[in-house]
């Protein structure tokens, strides 16, 4: 009878009752790694959960697909790929005599599966636009705590590992460090889907070379060339794909669309939006709203966030092209029809005089107030460093037992990869170009 009630309740909740499923095994056909078998019941149940299924609707690379049309893969397959690599890493380390218990293996796998669960629509592109002052890692941690309550504490250890509160530091390093399985998966995957072969790395070789010394992850010296290639690939992928100038132009347009929609809604205008998106348009959501457990429309903010995805944004933006507000209509139309702003990149900041001239041109061309010029002009800088030596450095283990940081261990000069590279950019509508 109890099973029957669970079954009926699950129909109303539009969920299949996991407790009634007998065969909790899954084989996922991944285009990068082939067939990935999910053997653990906990991992199976987490994958089935709506919080995780939402990742199918969040693009891994925000709007990179506007330049690389194949780059439509999602956070879902990235997380599953990272699980596959985590399993390989665990087996390699166990074979080398590193003690990892069955519970630890399951927990570190759950941690990597859920590490990106806190990403919002379009991943990094809107990270600070949807919610202010809180990172996706912090939201991932909150969602894990929420799942942990639902899973009766089965994620206790996974959360400690994720937050680096567990004594075996190398387990956390496999999830989040300069050489974690997150990066090993995303470089290969993003390279595969974007078609940019510069990102291909020898993840198999790197994993085979993993070891642990004094509780921390190290790479055996034979793997040094694979690490050099990994660092260079990361640098190339950042500049060639993630921070490609046209991708930046599109992502800032998206940021401005959302900013304008918020401004109008806060002034009392009614705009087309799903109930979930409406909460984020009507309120300036900060970390405090999450921490205080504030509810909106009778639902917790966390559960509202956990049902927001790319489709909420795209359906609205399609509609906003026809809004009476000319700025929102213009920005939305530009994004939907790929009429992207011109973007210029420079190693030096753009002169104040040139920015002032451009602002004036925009004001006259569009007939907008000085404050609204910012919707048509983006003027900022971007930075990236492929590797940041520090507490969380990549360490190489030599045959004699000596451990050295990669920069000391390698015979080439990798120091430029540790430098933070800054580039300045300016974006504005193409029709303003001087003919
Ligand atoms: P990292 O490990 O590189 O420090 P992270 O924020 O911890 O980065 P994530 O997995 O959340 O790790 O993000 C990395 C992924 O997001 C990877 O697929 C590259 C992509 N990415 C990063 N920045 C951008 C961007 N501005 N636009 C598009 N994609 C991006």
Image (cartoon, helix red, strand yellow):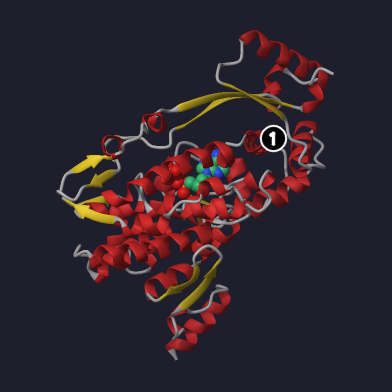
Q: Count how many numbered circles sit on residues in the image.
A: 1
Q: Visible in this render: residue 127?
A: no
Q: Is mark 1 within 8 Å of ligand 1?
A: no
Where's residue 192, x and y in %?
A: 57, 55
- Quadrant in which residue 268 is drawn: top right
Q: Nearer the viewer, residue 221 or 173?
A: 221
Q: Which residue is rendered at x = 47% and y = 59% of the image? A: 79
Up-down: is 138 above or below 98? Answer: above
Per the image, label 1 sits on a secondary structure element best described as helix
- Quadrant in which residue 115 is drawn: bottom left
Q: Residue furthest right?
A: 435
Q: Which residue is rendered at x = 47% and y = 27% of the image? A: 421
The residue where tag 1 is placed is: 264
- Quadrant in which residue 153 is drawn: bottom left
Q: Residue furthest front?
A: 411
Where's residue 408, x and y in %?
A: 26, 35
Q: Nearer the viewer, residue 125 or 317?
A: 125
Q: Badge 1: few (under 14), some or many (20 or more) residues near its Cα, within 10 Å?
A: some
In the rendered image, the quadrant that contains the C terminus is: top right
In the visual, does 219 lie left or right of 55?
A: left
Q: Nearer the viewer, residue 55 or 193?
A: 193
Q: Which residue is rendered at x = 72% and y = 52% of the image? A: 315
Q: Nearer the viewer, residue 269 or 244?
A: 244
Up-down: is 24 above or below 182? Answer: below
Q: Which residue is rendered at x = 48% and y = 38% of the image? A: 235
In the rendered image, the quadrant that contains the N terminus is: bottom left
Where's residue 45, x and y in %?
A: 43, 72
Q: Residue furthest top?
A: 353
């Amino acid at each position: 009878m109890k099973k029957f009630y669970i079954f009926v309740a699950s129909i109303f909740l539009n969920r299949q009752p996991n407790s009634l499923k007998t065969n909790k095994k899954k084989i996922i056909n991944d285009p990068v790694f082939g067939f990935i078998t999910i053997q653990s019941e906990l991992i199976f149940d987490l994958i089935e959960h709506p919080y995780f299924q939402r990742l199918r609707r969040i693009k891994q690379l925000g709007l990179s697909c506007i330049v690389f049309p194949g780059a439509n893969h999602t956070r879902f397959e990235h997380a599953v790929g990272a699980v596959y690599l985590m399993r390989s890493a665990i087996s390699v380390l166990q074979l080398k005599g590193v003690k990892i218990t069955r519970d630890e293996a399951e927990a570190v796998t759950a941690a990597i599966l859920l590490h990106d669960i806190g990403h919002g629509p379009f991943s990094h592109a809107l990270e600070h636009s949807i919610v202010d002052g809180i990172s996706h890692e912090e939201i991932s941690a909150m969602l894990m705590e929420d799942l942990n309550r639902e899973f009766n504490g089965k994620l206790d250890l996974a959360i400690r590992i994720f937050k680096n509160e567990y004594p075996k530091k190398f387990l956390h390093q496999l999830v989040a460090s300069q050489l974690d399985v997150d990066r090993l998966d995303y470089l290969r995957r993003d390279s595969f889907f974007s078609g940019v072969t510069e990102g291909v790395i020898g993840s198999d070789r790197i994993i085979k070379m993993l070891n642990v010394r004094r509780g921390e992850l190290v790479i055996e010296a034979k793997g040094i060339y694979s690490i050099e290639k990994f660092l260079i690939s990361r640098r190339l992928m950042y500049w060639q794909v993630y921070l490609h100038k046209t991708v930046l132009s599109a992502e800032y347009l998206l940021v401005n669309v959302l900013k304008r929609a918020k401004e109008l809604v806060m002034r009392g205008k009614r705009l087309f939006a799903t109930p979930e998106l409406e909460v984020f348009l009507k309120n300036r959501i900060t970390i405090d709203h999450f921490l205080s457990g504030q509810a909106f429309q009778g639902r917790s903010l966390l559960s509202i966030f956990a049902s927001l995805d790319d489709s909420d944004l795209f359906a609205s933006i399609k509609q906003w092209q026809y809004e009476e507000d000319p700025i929102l209509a213009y920005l939305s139309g530009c994004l939907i029809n790929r009429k992207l702003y011109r973007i210029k990149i420079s190693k030096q900041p753009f002169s104040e005089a040139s920015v002032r001239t451009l602002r004036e041109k925009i004001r006259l061309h569009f007939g907008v107030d000085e404050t609204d010029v910012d919707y048509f002009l983006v003027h900022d800088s971007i930075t990236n460093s492929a590797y940041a030596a520090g507490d969380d450095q990549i360490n190489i283990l030599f045959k004699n037992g000596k451990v050295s940081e990669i920069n000391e261990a390698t015979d080439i000069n990798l120091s430029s990869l540790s430098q933070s590279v800054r580039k300045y950019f300016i974006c504005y509508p193409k029709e303003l170009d001087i003919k």
